[in-house]
Image (spheres, helix red, strand yellow):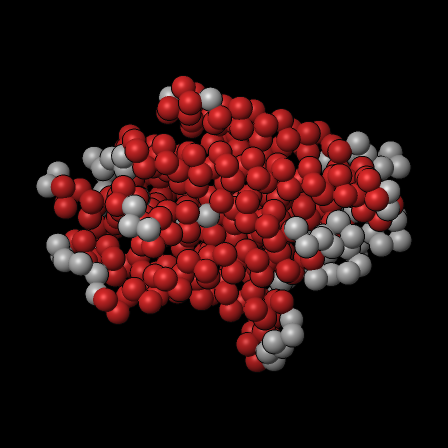
Amino acid sequence: MLDLAVKGSKKYWGLLGILGAIVAFGAFFYFKQLSFGLGITGMSRDVSWGFYIAQFTFLVGVAAGGVMVVLPYYLHDYKAFGRITILGEFLAISAITMCLLFILVDLGQPMRMLNVIFYPTPNSMLFWDMIVLNGYLFLNILIGWNVLEAERNGTHYGAWLKPFIYLSIPWAVGIHTVTAYLYCGLPGRHFWLTAILAPRFLASAFAAGPALLILLCLIVRRVTNFDPGREQIQSLAKIVTYALILNVFFLLCEVFVAFYSNIPGHMDHLKYLFVGLHGHNTLVPWMWSAIALMLIAIILLLIPTCRRNEGVLAVACGMLFIGAWIDKGMGMIAGGFVPNPLHEVNEYMPTGPEVAITLGVWAAGFIVLTILYKMATGVKEEAAGV
């Protein structure tokens, strides 16, 4: 099927060229980081995880969100999702690739990643995060490639693949649960020390991941001869709506518990994010923007006429995606580190090189996604005789 990836229009190659240039731009700053060290970033003694890990956390959710099309199709035989399941699996591959790259750039020295393999520590969540992320990447490559190849050959995928398909469903939940445990397993960080963090992560994942998939389906319809289907997009939109409502509800639960208990260690992080603390309020406009975007998205998605209008649906999904990215990215990471356990406020904002490297990783992920979608739509077009 790789032959389909090297056959494309000028627009296809132009897009890959632009993304490649962004990757090169990010790589330039990454090599500067390699020579200078992580001091080139905005991270410090108090904020040891920054913009890179914020992207990692968000993208694990995007990858896990793919299960929202896999589960109905393979487990509940919802035939309509058969048209877009491969798109969800290929999105997961791209997202996990970016997750691994963000871990790589966050380590400072890439050779450090081998320590997890050479000196395994099963009592560490980082060890299990390596297992679930790489395992989920392998499962999606295995399933996606074989299912698509079978479709191209006009056959049904082999029965041997079914156990891997069924395994991928709880595994998708597992990757984001383990990611949440990385945070809530740190007793010194009160903002993360909550049992509801994993459900909140999953609710956000099942909103942001399918929302991005909807946007990609709409793009695929415009630029290829393959139509993912209106029913499929509308079914995904309903899933996104309920997941987003749950995500906002879980956030409100956190606010209630923190302020009703009146425990400073829990309240101060939320105060810093939403009203500022001790005169420090860098993230306040960002967080209120995230809340506004998610609430407007809920309203648009709840109104059937708005949801059925694909132009409005695209706007709502875009707002949701950006809102969740701010909340789960910068808000979750910086909010957990600021203030520090001594209640001192040392704010964090990403530097220019950090942003450039981040853009490079996102571009690398979208190169993978573009190539995979080119193969997927090519097979779909062949099967339809287009």
Give the tally of numbered discs. 0
Question: Of all residues shown, which one is farthest toward the top?
Answer: 305
Write down the quadrant of residue 16 in the picture.
top left
Give coordinates of residue 59: x percent, y percent.
52, 49
**Furthest-bottom residue in this view:** 118
User: Dividing the picture into quarters, in which one does residue 377 lie?
Assistant: top left
Quadrant containing the C terminus in the rendered view: top left
Residue shown at 73% from the left, 61% from the top: 186
- Closer-to-camera residue (122/330): 122
Which quarter of the rendering shows the N terminus? bottom left
Q: Position of residue 32 (x, y in %)?
A: 61, 55
Q: Is residue 370 left or right of residue 312?
A: left
Residue 58, horizontal then vertical, whole percent: 56, 47
Q: Residue at x 64, y 31 (%)?
A: 291
Tell me if I can see residue 356 in this picture: no
Residue 191 visible? The answer is: yes
Q: Is residue 185 left or right of residue 238?
A: right
Asked whether 347 or 29 is in front, the reply is 347
Between 18 and 321, the residue placed more toward the observer is 321
Residue 359 image point, x, y percent: 53, 44
Q: Is residue 335 left or right of residue 164?
A: right
Residue placed at 37% from the left, 36% from the top? 235
Residue depicted at 20% across the width and 45% down the height: 380
Q: Residue most toward the front? A: 76
